[in-house]
């Protein structure tokens, strides 16, 4: 998944001319958090108690990458 996210990110920023790409990840999904970080995304913040899934409330971590 690491390579796929990198390819999609580069394509979005270069070929599609996106200025910013953002993503939200639930706090328990540590692997997805790391994939975004490894591809240059930076954490913008945490939305506390943003989602309820299977009867539990989770925080959502927001990441983005901005074209330089």
Image (spheres, rainbow, N blue to C red):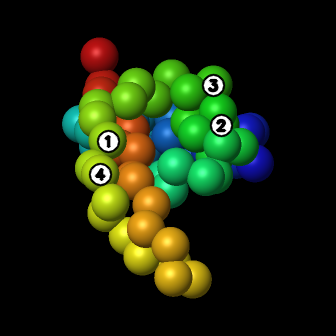
Residue at 29 percent of width and 35 percent of height: 45
Residue at 63 percent of width and 52 percent of height: 29
Earlier-in-chain disc, 4 versus 2: 2
Q: Is residue 7 visible?
A: no
Mark 4 or 1: in front is 4
**Position of 66 relative to 29 (above/below):** above
> Mark 3 near mark 4, Cβ–Cβ under 8 Å?
no
> Mark 3 near mark 1, Cβ–Cβ under 8 Å?
no
Which sits in the foreground, 51 or 44?
51
Spatial distance from mark 4 to mark 1, Cα to Cα? Answer: 6 Å
| In the displayed structure image, the side of residue 64 where residue 6 appears, left or right | right
Residue 66 placed where, x, y %? 30, 28
Residue at 50 percent of width and 73 percent of height: 56
> Mark 2 near mark 3, Cβ–Cβ under 8 Å?
yes
Spatial distance from mark 3 to mark 1, Cα to Cα? Answer: 19 Å
Label 1 belongs to which residue? 46
Kindly give the residue lying farthest to the bottom in the view shown: 54
Residue 59 placed where, x, y %? 40, 54
On residue 48, which mark appears?
Answer: 4
**Looking at the rendering, which quadrant does residue 7 occupy?**
top right
Label 3 belongs to which residue? 38
Residue at 45 percent of width and 29 percent of height: 41
| Quarter of the figure with the C terminus | top left
Earlier-in-chain disc, 1 versus 2: 2
Q: Is residue 54 visible?
A: yes
Earlier-in-chain disc, 3 versus 4: 3
Label 2 belongs to which residue? 35
Mark 3 or 1: in front is 1
Residue 52 placed where, x, y %? 42, 76
């Amino acid at each position: 998944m690491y390579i796929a996210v990198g390819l999609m990110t580069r394509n979005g920023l270069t070929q599609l001319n996106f200025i910013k790409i953002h993503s939200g990840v639930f706090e328990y999904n540590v692997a997805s958090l790391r994939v975004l970080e490894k591809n240059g995304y930076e954490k913008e913040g945490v939305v506390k108690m943003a989602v309820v899934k299977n009867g539990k409330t989770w925080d959502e971590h927001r990441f983005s990458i901005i074209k330089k």
